């Protein structure tokens, strides 16, 4: 396999756009920013991988081909991936494979999400299309009729973890929300920069046990783009770059009740082990992590899945400040999904781009001291079915 470099990063702000921007506009903005960042032109791009979660939200069947044409990439190969919340991570993996295999030297990975086209502009309420899309993301025979939603599907492993270990407690989960909202204040592209207290989180309205409003990320709109290239191309290009040195993936059984152990994020544990093995490192070699904190408990359980601590000790890790900006292993310096928002097709791409900026020392006010190697987690599906774990390092 060839070594794969990240030579360009481009992002839009994550926030609701309503009629201000189309999904093609957002894709164009992120792609243009990445090309400028890399110092190359669209003609240098040999292939594209698109992470677009659901064409119903874009109100356009096969939206990727319209983005492809608008970017001036007609007649070059393209692929679209959609793996729920892990769509962006899966897109990065697919692009990485094209470069690592020698199939292409430069591949654009572009994630985009535009969902307000399916909301009523005046009332800002979801249309039936949105409600159907959310419902159809679960099993329609047994699970959705019993109330499965993204929040309840994450609540299941959380409650199993609490039953087994007694954690995470509501105050521990609240500390994650406080941390990530605060970190977002240093990210100009984040949707939810806030100064909150634990009391604010605990007093927010309940969503589903054990989650309250501030335990959840916000659904968002935006686009993120990476330009992946062979390391030889990156060296010839003469600009700073980051390396993707490890990628691991795992897909668990989508029906949580069938899993042998619902109290751990098993797909994340296995994906992490595979990524560590490919990169030739272990958890203690990491300087930071960008974790998929769609819900606060998911971040705490991910500490354990990736070996940052022993099983059942994730809550203590956040209590001790280990994962804060001043701690030994800062997690979600970007603000994470809770602070940035979750633009589903773009989120995993954004996370990998954040890791690249960290190891290139270009993260601005959110820069982690001594950052040379980080882990990115991209997860999706009911109760964390998919996980893609990606190791990003300085050359």
Image (cartoon, rainbow, N blue to C red):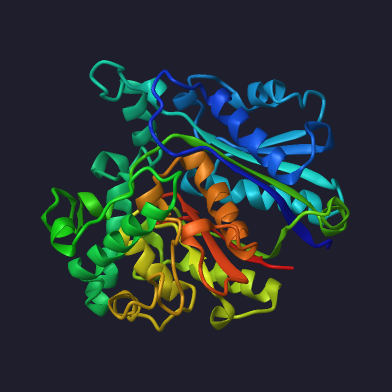
Q: Residue at x 54, y 35 (%)?
A: 112
Quarter of image, res 75: top right
Q: Is residue 275 left or right of residue 326?
A: right
Q: Residue at x 32, y 58 (%)?
A: 182
* View extreme (left): residue: 203
The image position of residue 272, as x and y in percent, is 56, 70
Q: Nearest the camera: 19 or 302?
A: 19
Q: Is residue 318 left or right of residue 91?
A: left
Q: Nearest the camera: 299 or 210?
A: 299
The image position of residue 2, as x and y in percent, is 84, 61
* View extreme (top): residue: 122
The image position of residue 314, as x and y in percent, is 34, 76
Q: Residue at x 78, y 32 (%)?
A: 42
Q: Nearest the camera: 205 or 395?
A: 395
The image position of residue 149, as x and y in percent, is 30, 44
Confirm whether residue 31 shows in the render. Answer: yes
Confirm whether residue 255 shows in the render. Answer: no
Q: Quadrant of the N terminus?
A: bottom right
Q: Residue at x 70, y 39 (%)?
A: 36
Q: Relative to residue 301, is residue 65 depicted above or below?
A: above
Q: Quadrant of the C terminus?
A: bottom right
């Amino acid at each position: 396999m060839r070594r794969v470099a990240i030579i360009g990063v481009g992002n839009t702000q994550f926030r609701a756009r309503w009629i201000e921007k189309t999904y093609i506009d957002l894709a164009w903005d992120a792609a243009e920013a990445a090309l400028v960042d890399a110092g190359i032109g669209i003609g240098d791009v040999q292939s594209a991988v698109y992470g677009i979660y659901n064409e119903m939200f874009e109100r356009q069947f096969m939206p990727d081909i319209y983005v492809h044409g608008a970017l001036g990439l007609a007649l070059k190969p393209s692929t679209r991936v959609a793996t729920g919340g892990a769509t962006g991570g899966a897109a990065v993996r697919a692009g990485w494979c094209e470069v690592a295999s020698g199939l292409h030297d430069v591949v654009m990975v572009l994630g985009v999400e535009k969902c307000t086209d399916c909301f009523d502009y005046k009332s800002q309420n979801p249309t039936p299309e949105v409600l159907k899309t959310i419902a159809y993301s679960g099993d329609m025979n047994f699970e959705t009729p019993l109330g499965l939603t993204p929040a309840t599907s994450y609540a299941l492993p959380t409650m199993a973890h609490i039953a087994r270990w007694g954690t995470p407690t509501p105050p521990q989960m609240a500390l994650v929300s406080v941390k990530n909202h605060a970190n977002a204040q240093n990210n100009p592209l984040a949707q939810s920069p806030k100064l909150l207290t634990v009391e604010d989180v605990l007093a927010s309205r309940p969503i589903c046990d054990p989650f309250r409003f501030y335990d959840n990320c916000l659904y968002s709109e935006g686009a993120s783009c990476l330009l992946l290239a062979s390391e030889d191309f990156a060296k010839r290009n003469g600009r700073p770059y980051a390396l993707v040195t490890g990628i691991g993936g795992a897909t668990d059984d989508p029906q949580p009740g069938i899993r042998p152990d619902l109290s751990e994020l098993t797909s994340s544990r296995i994906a992490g082990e595979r990524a560590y093995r490919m990169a030739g490192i272990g958890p203690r070699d990491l300087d930071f992590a960008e974790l998929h904190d769609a819900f606060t408990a998911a971040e705490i359980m991910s500490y354990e899945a990736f070996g940052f601590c022993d099983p059942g000790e994730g809550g203590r890790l956040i209590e001790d400040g280990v994962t804060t900006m001043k701690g030994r292993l800062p997690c979600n310096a970007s603000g994470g999904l809770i602070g940035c928002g979750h633009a589903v097709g773009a989120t995993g791409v954004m996370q990998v781009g954040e890791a690249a900026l960290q190891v290139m020392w270009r993260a601005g006010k959110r820069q982690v001291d001594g950052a040379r190697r980080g882990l990115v987690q991209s997860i999706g599906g009911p109760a964390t079915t998919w996980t893609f774990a990606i190791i990003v390092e300085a050359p």
